[in-house]
Image (spheres, coloured by chain):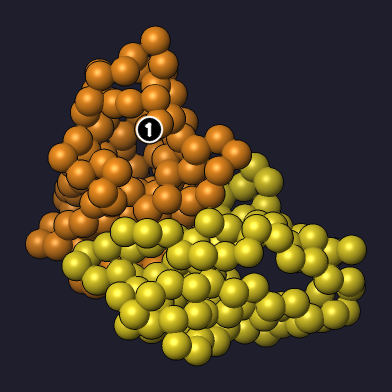
Amino acid sequence: EVQLVESGGGLVQPGRSLRLSCAASGFTFDDYAMHWVRQAPGKGLEWVSGISWNSGSIGYADSVKGRFTISRDNAKNSLYLQMNSLRAEDTALYYCAKDQLFSIFSTFDIWGQGTMVTVSS
Amino acid sequence: QSALTQPPSASGSPGQSVTISCTGTSSDVGGYNYVSWFQQHPGKAPKLMIYELIKRPSGVPDRFSGSKSGNTASLTVSGLQAEDEADYYCSSYAGSNNLVFGGGTKLTVL
């Protein structure tokens, strides 16, 4: 069964850091680009960041550029999101999502259930 | 990286057809065929319904179809059913390793 399981969310104070992880199973992880997508409570979807199969291509939304870092470990079938200088507006459910292609960012065909990040003092 | 524009709401009666639009620019929707549509029921993760403008993943009913004209993509749901009531989001590749979503459309089956 193809599966993505996120972890690492929680309550964090503004300005602090948090690292999200996504464990993939049921498919050849290093054949595909991967993404993080977030959804603030009651709001729409926002693409956060994406990474190609070999980490050669990486992209970030303007809202997180310079603060968040995406990475992957193909040996561990895992995707990560290092979030620094967190702000209240980063509060959201963070989804890990699989692309259909290995290099160009095209779509999200498999989604995890998400991990909640709450930034508050 | 401006969000794509979708109508906040759409509605139709069972058996009818409804079309949801997704308007971008020549830098995203108009420039690439990597346009997708997602369905999201309350409390659930999004589900891919259409990718690369017109393709349907296995298991998605052929009542769902996609198209594009210029900078506007559209999702048409034919033969509306109660279970189609959900939020729908479009997304597009926007060049330079960027993706962008629409603001979402709440589809109500009357």
The chain to which mark 1 is attached is: A
Residue A115 located left or right of residue A15 = right
Q: x%, y% of residue B2?
A: 37, 59
Q: How many marks?
A: 1
Question: Dot 1 corresponds to which residue?
Answer: A90
Q: Is residue B72 left or right of residue A88?
A: right
- Chain A colour is orange
Residue B61 seen in the figure: no
Q: Considering the numbered disc 1 on the image, is that residue within a helix, a strand or a loop? A: helix
- Looking at the image, which residue is at 42% across and 50% down? A46
Reply above or below: A100 against A113.
below
Q: Amino acid at mark 1?
A: Asp
Q: For the point 31% across and 37% down, which residue is it?
A: A21
Label 1 crowd bin: few (<14), some (14–19), many (20+), radius 10 Å = many
Instruction: Tell me: residue B101, above or below residue A8.
Output: below
Rendering quarter of residue B85:
bottom right
Q: Residue at horizontal 21%, vertical 56%?
A: A59
Residue B53 vs residue B9, the one in the foreground: B9
x then y, percent, for residue B24? 43, 72
Q: Picture quarter containing residue B30?
A: bottom left
Q: Position of residue B94 (x, y in %)?
A: 30, 69
Q: Is residue A121 left or right of residue B45?
A: left
As drawn, the chain in yellow is: B
Residue A96 in sight = yes
- Picture quadrant where residue B84 is located: bottom right
Q: Nearer the viewer, residue A99 or A92?
A: A92
